[in-house]
Amino acid sequence: MPNVECPREQDLLDALTAGRWPERCEAELRAHVDGCAICTDLVEVVGALFDARDVVYADVAVPASGTVWWRAQIRARREASLRAARPMTVVQAVAACLGLVAVIGLYFLAAPWLSDSFAPLSGLMTFRFDGLTLPGIDAVKQWAWPIAVILGTWLIVTPIAIYLTAGKE
């Protein structure tokens, strides 16, 4: 089985990373690398990696530390304001849903009493409780549970959807 480790590998790696290879390292280490296949491969691989690193570093434009700090402060403030606004967004969404339900409920409760006031608009107000007979109420009752389930689901899902979409902005 071929040897996959060399006792001088760490010494060579230290010299490579410190930038001492090959000019500023011991002659003994250079002689070892000439005779060791593992260390020769290490020099080739690490040398290629360092060359690629130098090419990438040449193109990098690092901003000043003050600019980085300023951008970090702006980002932190923006994120803090979004986090602070989330509960208010949820409250507004729930209030809007409950307000809509209240308006619809008040319409159905007040429709018989307001029918005289809105006589010119009677064509628009086609659903009235005073015209319902007992079989008509039974017809409404059969749809009561599905409508209640749909409205309940809508009341729960709508604020959650608004919260999730407002949180991503």
Image: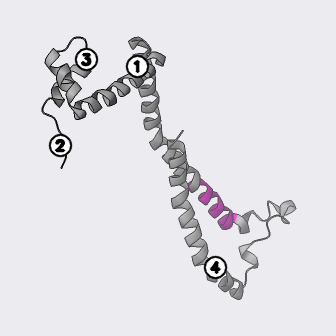
The image quarter containing residue 108 is bottom right
**Residue in the picture at 80% in, 70% down:** 126
Give the amino acid at mark 3: Trp
The answer to which of marks 1 and 3 sits earlier in the sequence is 3
Q: Is residue 161 above or below residue 7?
A: below
Q: Residue furthest front?
A: 35
Residue annotated with mark 4: 143
Q: Quadrant of the C terminus?
A: top right
Asked if residue 35 lies left or right of residue 105, the reply is left
Q: Secondary structure at mark 3?
A: loop
Tell which of 95 and 103 is nearer to you. 95
Asked if residue 54 lies left or right of residue 163, the reply is left
Q: Position of residue 17 (x, y in %)?
A: 25, 21
Q: Which circle, 4 or 1, is nearer the viewer?
A: 1
**Residue in the picture at 17% in, 39% down:** 5
Q: Which circle, 3 or 4, is nearer the viewer?
A: 3
**Residue in the picture at 71% in, 74% down:** 129
What is the chief secondary structure element of the magenta stretch?
helix
Q: How many marks?
A: 4
Q: Which portion, as a residue range, is magenta?
A: 98-110
Residue annotated with mark 1: 54
Residue annotated with mark 2: 3
Label 1 near label 4: C-beta < 8 Å?
A: no
Q: Is residue 79 above or below residue 125?
A: above
